[in-house]
Amino acid sequence: MDYLDEFYRNYDEEGRLLSQSGQVEYLTTMKYIHDFLGGAKQVRILEVGAGTGRYSIALAREGYEVTAVELVESNLNKLRAKLDGSESLTAVQGNALDLSELSDNSFDVTLLLGPMYHLFTREDMLRALSEAVRVTRKGGYILAAYCMNEAAVLQHAFLHGNLQKVLDNDMITDEWHCKSEPKELFALMRTEEIAALNAELPVERIKLIAADGAANYMSDCIDGMDSFTFDKYMEYHFATCERQDLIGASNHALDILRKL
């Protein structure tokens, strides 16, 4: 996966989540993580695809025992450089498709907040999800994030003026589904495809969330909001992010599953 290593060496993922519009996704994801942690501190959390540690380090500093698995070495180095030694966090290099070094039923909550973005076959998606389910205890939770197809079509093709390039390069089907390939970096999904993956696994869906809703469509507006307006925007977002009629148009969806 050299394409991933090259991309993340040159992409400011940390900056994306720290901008005010980027905070919508981060704050939403953390809200739902905390909802399913339920206030308990004796919880083991696994994050697969931990990136530079934005979620793992924050959770470890709250007192949780965290294992962070990251494929891209440059990301892993950035994560480790942020640790001050006070955190109960183990960071290892590994692949979402093979977590064989981790035991069955070991974690209370497993986070897949990045790997599903970069898996381009149904087989690989099921392998990653299956591994996440395997290492999660019965009754535990798996939170998996996806990049959504309609947001990519609306923004990349139309809003950003790339329609002709998309058509010339045969990047989209007659049904307006993006043809996700490794060279495009991101796998783009529809809600029915996510549901079909879940149907293959011993899980039940608890919630499907529009993690950032309209944030990427109106990023300049959100980044320019004063704190009062941004707080009100987040109130609106939290009030609507579980509406199923909005999920498909969000840039990112968060699927919350319970292991049966």
Image: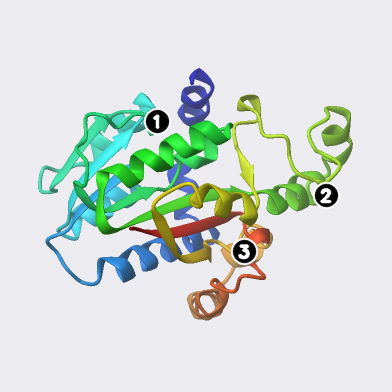
Answer with mark 3 or mark 1, whichever residue precedes in sequence.
Answer: 1
Query: Picture quarter containing residue 163?
Result: top right
Report x, y in % for residue 124: 50, 32
Judged left or right of residue 189, residue 54 is left
Q: Residue at x 51, y 29 (%)?
A: 10
Residue 13's tag is none
Q: Nearer the viewer, residue 213 or 61?
A: 213
Provide the residue designation for mark 1.
Answer: 97
Q: Which residue is mark 3?
A: 247
Front-lying residue, 256 or 153: 256
Give the distance between the C-alpha atoms of the residues marked 3 and 1, in whole angstroms.
26 Å
Task: Give the SS element for disc 1.
Answer: loop
Q: Is disc 3 in contact with disc 2, using a CB cutoff of under 8 Å?
A: no
Q: Residues within 10 Å of mark 2 (few under 14, many from 20)?
A: few
Q: Amino acid at mark 2?
A: Phe
Quadrant position of the C terminus in the picture: bottom left
The image's colouring method is rainbow
Horizontal placement of 98 versus 148: left or right? left
The amino acid beneath tag 3 is Ile
Which residue is at the far top?
A: 2
At x 58%, y 31%, the residue is 121
Q: Can you give x and y, in whole percent of width and height, for residue 140 in the image?
A: 27, 58
Of the residues tagged 3 and 1, which is closer to the observer?
1
Q: Is residue 131 visible?
A: yes
CA neighbours of label 1 inside 10 A, class few (<14), some (14 to 19), many (20+): some
Separation of disc 1 and disc 2 at Cα?
A: 34 Å
Q: Could you classify mark 3 by the number of other residues whose Cα lies within 10 Å: few (under 14), some (14-19), or many (20 or more)? A: many
Q: Nearer the viewer, mark 1 or mark 2?
A: 1
Q: Residue at x 47, y 42 (%)?
A: 13
Name the kind of residue labelled 1 in the image: Leu
The answer to whether mark 3 and mark 1 are in CB contact below 8 A is no
Write down the residue under mark 2. 158
